[in-house]
Image (tube, rainbow, N blue to C red):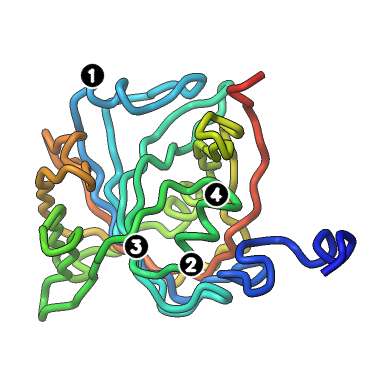
């Protein structure tokens, strides 16, 4: 393979058999369970990087079922998102993500810098309760339960929250192990089509694990819970801060 062929072909690894296709990436019937809770402010300060600003000691613990996503397939995801502000603009910082599919793990980390790790999250409907769990290996790390569609909520409010920007830390090491890329990345969800939104009584528990450390942002008080479905496109990102300059 000649140098010009490498440059023409390369967009992801491995060179001749990439782990995921080129975007854009469209998601159909995405199902969200979001548990919003109050946590310890000092614990939050220890993990949210400057120049992002913490608004309140609040975390959103998310379980997301993605049965139909172009390029990435059928998978489930779980993790923590923190409401933040950047240069006067409200958004969310993605702190942790655990999922069960190689392609979105690799694509998410390489393109945007999503903090994705391999885990085993599940969303199941058990009669009048929605049950969501995260296992890392054989260990239960998170468990959330929510009543099934007790009360409809204004879809425009949910849509507005989904349209806010999201922020990530993209980290890529050099071949000698030193830091080569360390960037604050901003991305947004686009072309969102809401398909229903509800709230219900809920409960959330987080359990300590050395490599799935969701419990380091402890649940002090559950504030609200929401359940909604939507089609959407995962937009590409932009670098808003380079930590190495």
Write the residue at 19% across / 34% down: 216
Write the residue at 48% across / 26% down: 85
What secondary structure is marked by label 1?
helix
Residue wearing tag 1: 42
Counting residues from the start of the chain, the first of labels 2 and 4 encountered is 4
Which mark, by number, is residue 163?
4
Residue 18 in sight in this render: yes
Q: Residues within 10 Å of mark 1 (few under 14, many from 20)?
A: few
Quadrant assignment, res 155? bottom left
Image coordinates of residue 76 in percent, x first then y, are 34, 68
Image coordinates of residue 79 in percent, x first then y, are 31, 51
Q: Residues within 10 Å of mark 4 (few under 14, many from 20)?
A: some
What secondary structure is marked by label 4?
loop
In the visual, does 172 lie left or right of 225?
A: right
Write the residue at 59% across / 39% down: 186
Q: Nearer the viewer, mark 2 or mark 1?
A: 1
For the residues labelled 4 and 3, the Cα–Cα distance comes to: 23 Å
Quadrant assignment, res 226? bottom left
Q: Residues within 10 Å of mark 2 (few under 14, many from 20)?
A: some
Asked if residue 112 is positioned above or below residue 184 in the image, the reply reads below
For the residues labelled 2 and 4, the Cα–Cα distance comes to: 12 Å
Counting residues from the start of the chain, the first of labels 4 and 1 encountered is 1
Residue wearing tag 2: 194
What secondary structure is marked by label 3?
strand
Q: Residues within 10 Å of mark 3 (few under 14, many from 20)?
A: many
């Amino acid at each position: 393979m000649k140098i010009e062929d490498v440059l023409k072909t390369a967009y992801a690894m491995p060179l001749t058999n990439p782990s995921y296709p080129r975007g854009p990436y469209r998601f159909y019937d995405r199902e969200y369970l979001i548990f919003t809770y109050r946590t310890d402010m000092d614990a939050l300060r220890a993990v949210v990087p400057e120049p992002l600003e913490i608004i309140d000691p609040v975390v959103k613990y998310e379980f997301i079922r993605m049965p139909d996503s172009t390029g990435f397939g059928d998978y489930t995801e779980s993790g923590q998102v923190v409401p933040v502000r950047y240069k006067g603009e409200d958004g969310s910082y993605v702190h942790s993500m655990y999922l069960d599919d190689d392609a979105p793990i690799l694509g998410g980390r390489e393109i945007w810098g999503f903090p994705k790790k391999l885990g085993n999250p599940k969303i199941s409907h058990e009669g009048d309760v929605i049950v969501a769990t995260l296992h890392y290996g054989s260990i239960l790390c998170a468990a959330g339960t929510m009543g099934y569609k007790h009360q409809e909520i204004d879809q425009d409010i949910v849509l507005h929250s989904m349209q806010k920007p999201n922020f990530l830390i993209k980290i890529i090491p050099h071949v000698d192990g030193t830091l080569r890329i360390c960037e604050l990345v901003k991305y947004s969800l686009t072309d969102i089509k809401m398909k229903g939104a509800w709230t219900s009584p809920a409960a959330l528990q987080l359990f300590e694990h050395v490599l799935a450390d969701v419990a380091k942002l402890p649940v002090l008080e559950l504030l609200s819970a929401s359940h909604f479905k939507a089609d959407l496109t995962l937009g590409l990102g932009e670098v808003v801060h380079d930590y190495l300059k």
